[in-house]
Amino acid sequence: MSEPEVFQYNLALVGASTLKGKEVKALLQERGFPVGRLALLDTEEAGGQLTEFDDEPVLVRPVGRDSFETMTFAVFASSPSFTEQHWQLAEECGCQIIDLSYCLETHPRARLRAPLIENLLGVPQQPQDADSRLAVSAHPAAMAIAGVLGCLSRRFEVTRCVALVLEPVSERGKAGVDELSRQTINLLSFQEIPKEVFDSQVAFNVLSSYGEQSHPPLRDAQNRISRHARELLQRRAVQPAVRLLQAPIFFGHAFCCYVDLADPVSTEAVEEALDQKPFEVSRDPNDPPNVVGVAGSSEIALGSVERDPAGESGYWIYGAMDNVRIAALNAVEIAEEKVFAGTGRSLGEETLNPKS
């Protein structure tokens, strides 16, 4: 039986020079997404940058009124304010919009999507999933927490979950990465540190909040993770309590979940329940995951499960993931879902349209 024909699709990538934008472009090429024409769009300042796609030179261009004409998809990896300026123009041109900036998360027609972990949650694909033209890609930490609870709740009764998440500065884009770098250098050379992004010392520090002049505040990101996790889980599992701390990490979320089960089970049984894509469980207690080790990985790494000494039905689950990679991968899977809906082809293949 021959493979169903796969058409090519024109795609506009807005925020092509951002961290997430570059990762989306890389994943489109790695996974063989059937791109007909790729338009790389960004701010006036970023316009003119020369990059490549599929071994061909591509120029980053400023967004114009004709930027979205003939485009099937518009992926917004830009800042929320830049998305706000241009998403309606993309919609007017008939684009299916995938929002990585969270600008549209409260829009009444937008749907929060996480195809990366929806199968773990037992979420059936709704007809409106393929038809909806506004999709918001869920926060990476929310996907990890919801995915852990989804895996466990299919095997056990989870009565409580508390999650601590360590935020990397790359969640604030290149500006956050640059500020941590400059803070570290200046502190070591006894110079005044820059605070334009965080209005606080992030280097060699852990923060529960930013300075008063920093916007958006850290609490907004914490609320987003909680809200996205609740929306993904709905009533399928217990709702997690989430706490977010800013860590002096360039890339990669680290997180720790404490879960209570109704009945005690072996740690091996918990690990077995969790060892499903996109999770990868390391059962070696001497080889826990870390943010350096997961750089560039499309999987969410989990360490060996530890029973809490204070209760035989309490368990600690530690994990790490490349936040930029996971966010971009989820956005690309949203597009893949729309492209391959009804073709019988499965999602999540390493190469969807291999080149001869």
Image: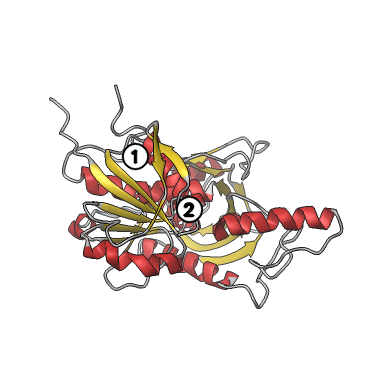
Numbered marks: total: 2
Q: How far across and how far down the image is residue 320, in percent?
A: 57, 47
Residue plotted at (48% across, 56% down):
145
Mark 1 is surrounded, within 10 Å at the Cα level, by few (under 14), some (14 to 19) or many (20 or more) other residues, namely some
Q: Is residue 312 above or below residue 272?
A: below
**Residue located farthest toward the top when viewing the structure as drawn:** 356
Residue plotted at (66% across, 71% down):
210
Q: Is residue 56 left or right of residue 305?
A: left
Q: Identify residue for label 2.
A: 144
Q: How far across and how far down the image is residue 89, in percent?
A: 28, 65
Q: Residues under labels 1 and 2: Cα distance?
A: 17 Å
Q: How far across and how far down the image is residue 265, in percent?
A: 51, 48
Q: Is residue 2 left or right of residue 253?
A: left
The disc at residue 348 is 1
Q: Is residue 172 left or right of residue 234?
A: right
Q: Quadrant of the N terminus?
A: top left
